[in-house]
Image (cartoon, rainbow, N blue to C red):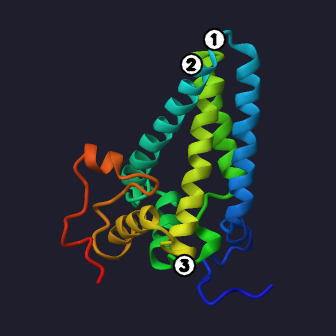
C-alpha cells in the first residue's frame, strides 16, 4: 500500500517502523471494547446504585484527562529520562514535525495494551472492584482522546466545539509548544496556567 503524501519514515529499522504505525480507528475500537468489558465486569460485582457506578466511570474519565495533560507535558516533551533517551519524546517530536501523518496519531496498540494491563493492576490494587469502573472510564477517556486528536489533525473543525479544540491544539503545534497541552479538554491547562494567550489563538 502506498504512503499518503503526509506519511513519513520514522525509523530505518523495519520492525520499529511497522510498530510505530497505528490505525486510529482500530485503536479507538480496541479501547472502547476494553472499557466496555471492564465496566461489565465491575457492574456485576459491585452492590451500589447505578448513579454511583456511573459516577465512578466519570471519575475515571476525569483521571484520564489529568493523565493526558501530565504525560503530554512532562513525558512527551522531555528528550531524556535521566541519562536515557526518551522514545516517547522521539515519537511525539516526529508527530510535531508530521502532524498530518494519520498513522502516528496513536500509541502502538501492543504497547498501549501492555500499559493498560499495568494500569488495570494499579486501579485494582488501589481500589479493588471499584477500580474496574475507574479503569473503564480511564480507557473510555483514552479512546475519546484518540478520536478527537484524529479529528483535529485529519478532519478539521466541523462544529464550534471542534473549532475551539482545533485552535487550542494548533497553538501547541504551530505557535508555542509550552502551552495548550490538553487535547481533549483545556481544563488542566487552565488549572496549571498553561493556557494560550488571546493573541496566540488568532489564526486568521
Question: Is residue 169 in sight in this rendering?
Answer: yes
Query: How packed is label 2: few (under 14 Cα within 10 Å), some, or many (20 or more)?
Result: few
**Residue, x 74% and y 53% (percent of image)?**
29
Query: How packed is label 3: few (under 14 Cα within 10 Å), some, or many (20 or more)?
Result: many
12 with respect to 152 (left or right): right
Front one among 143 and 58: 58
Q: Secondary structure at mark 1?
A: loop
| Quadrant that contains the C terminus | bottom left
Task: Please say if the residues under marks 2 and 1 sit with CB atoms less than 8 Å apart.
Answer: yes
**Residue, x 70% and y 86% (percent of image)?**
3
Residue annotated with mark 2: 52
193 with respect to 95 (left or right): left
Residue annotated with mark 1: 48
C-alpha span from label 2 to label 1: 6 Å
Front one among 2 and 40: 40
The x, y position of residue 22, in whole percent, is 69, 65
**Residue, x 46% and y 65% (percent of image)?**
162
Furthest residue in direction top, as rendered:
47
Q: Secondary structure at mark 3?
A: loop
**Quadrant in the picture for residue 23:** bottom right
Amino acid at each position: 500500500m502506498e504512503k499518503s503524501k503526509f506519511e513519513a519514515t520514522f525509523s530505518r529499522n523495519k520492525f520499529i517502523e511497522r510498530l510505530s504505525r497505528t490505525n486510529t480507528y482500530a485503536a479507538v475500537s480496541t479501547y472502547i471494547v476494553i472499557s466496555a468489558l471492564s465496566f461489565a465486569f465491575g457492574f456485576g460485582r459491585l452492590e451500589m446504585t447505578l448513579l454511583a457506578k456511573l459516577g465512578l466511570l466519570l471519575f475515571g474519565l476525569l483521571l484520564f484527562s489529568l493523565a493526558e495533560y501530565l504525560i503530554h507535558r512532562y513525558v512527551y516533551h522531555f528528550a531524556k529520562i535521566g541519562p536515557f533517551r526518551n522514545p516517547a519524546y522521539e515519537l511525539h517530536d516526529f508527530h510535531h514535525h508530521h502532524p498530518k501523518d494519520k498513522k502516528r496519531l496513536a500509541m502502538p496498540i501492543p504497547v498501549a495494551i501492555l500499559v493498560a494491563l499495568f494500569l488495570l493492576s494499579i486501579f485494582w490494587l488501589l481500589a479493588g472492584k471499584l477500580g474496574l469502573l475507574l479503569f473503564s472510564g480511564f480507557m473510555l477517556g483514552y479512546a475519546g482522546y484518540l478520536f478527537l486528536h484524529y479529528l483535529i489533525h485529519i478532519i478539521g473543525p466541523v462544529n464550534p466545539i471542534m473549532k475551539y479544540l482545533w485552535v487550542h491544539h494548533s497553538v501547541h503545534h504551530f505557535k508555542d509548544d509550552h502551552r495548550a497541552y490538553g487535547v481533549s479538554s483545556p481544563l488542566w491547562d487552565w488549572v496549571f496556567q498553561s493556557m494560550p494567550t488571546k493573541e496566540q489563538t488568532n489564526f486568521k
